[in-house]
Image (tube, rainbow, N blue to C red):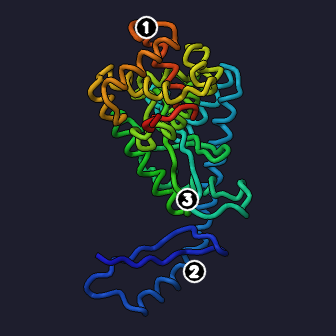
Amino acid sequence: MARIVVPVLVGGRIIARIWLIDESPRVSEDDISTVVETTADLLPHLVEHNDQQLRDATHAGELLLGILEAGKDRRETLFQQLEDHYDLADSERLHVGVVCIEPDFDVSHTQPETLPLDSILNSVIGLSEGNNVAGYTRDNQLVLLTSLDEADRSRLAVLSDVVRRSAMLHATSVSAIGVGGAMGSVNDFSKSVRQAAFTARICQRVAGLEGQASWDSLGEYRLFLDTEWSLAGVSSIHAGVASLIEEHKTPLASTLLTYLERDGDVEETAATLNVHRTTLYYRLRQAKKALGGTLMGNDGFGVHAALRLAQLSGLLSLDPPFW
């Protein structure tokens, strides 16, 4: 059915929307005028509600930042305040979500601090309904503590729906959503923040994840949590792979990664690269020679991990290397 929305404005800021279903009898211009007039009576209450929600969100964010910086005893005190004031679940059911926001408008003449992160956070809290959320903003990210209790995939779907709708309300979009592992205790908050931020970063580089994932579903990518995403990081896993990249032999490295990503299936790898099997065998021999080892067992695992990190770091592409 058709819908009519009447925004409630304070200055140029929308603080509420009144939705009308346009069905029989149809909404008339007089009806809309009546709604607009009525908003004058609603305005003081809506302003106070909105301002209180902003104050609560700010206070919750301050508590979360305090938990990150405090010692163990102080963390537990601050977390108890969160539980008391915001009706969050016990820490064993809590997860951290990190949401990366990007503007849908041209920000070439806009200062980063003008991006409406606080307003988006406020909308996320308002739209979360029974799933209580606390959070704070940093850079172009929202850090959310949520007590969603569904299975992993459902939890991510619910969080994704809320944050993407909230971003749309403020002319922005979400580039990645990462959910950390269950906290277990308040002392795990900082760990879950790191896991969620890392997961969001992975989501921005791995196309198959479609911009959202949870720490528990990342699989082998979790191995790179504490590894630098650089040539030095690649070298720390396998020096031979780093040498391939440093010596500008990235087409050879790309062929090798394509082969390993397909579990050594020659037919599938050759088809993906659009080369004859003889050509593929030649490249694999060249790769083994350059690496000075085998692609089996521990050696193969190290090579694969280093190549995967090189791809994440932007040092290596899986586009077919034509040479």
Q: Earlier in the sequence, mark 1 or mark 2?
A: 2
Q: Where's residue 109, x and y in %? A: 73, 64
User: Measured along the vertical axis of the image, is residue 153 above or below residue 237?
Assistant: below
Q: Residue at x 61, y 34 (%)?
A: 81
Q: Are marks 1 and 2 in contact (CB under 8 Å)?
A: no
User: Measured along the vertical axis of the image, is residue 237 above or below residue 161?
Assistant: above
Amino acid type, label 2 = Ala
Q: Are marks 3 and 2 in contact (CB under 8 Å)?
A: no
Instruction: Tell me the SS state at disc 3.
Output: strand
Q: Which residue is mark 1?
A: 294
Amino acid type, label 3 = Thr
Q: Which residue is mark 2?
A: 40
Image position of 13 (left or right of 292): right
Which part of the image, by quadrant, shows the N terminus? Answer: bottom left
Q: Where's residue 64, x and y in %? A: 63, 36
User: Measured along the vertical axis of the image, is residue 293 above or below residue 215?
Assistant: above
Q: Earlier in the sequence, mark 3 or mark 1?
A: 3
Q: Where's residue 90, x and y in %? A: 47, 29
Q: Nearer the viewer, residue 227 or 139?
A: 227
- Residue count near mark 2 (Cα–Cα under 10 Å), binned few <14, some 14–19, many ≥20: few
User: Measured along the vertical axis of the image, is residue 19 above or below residue 234?
Assistant: below
- CA separation in Å, label 3 and label 1: 48 Å
Q: Where's residue 125, x and y in %? A: 52, 50
User: From where the camera sits, is residue 196 visible?
Assistant: yes
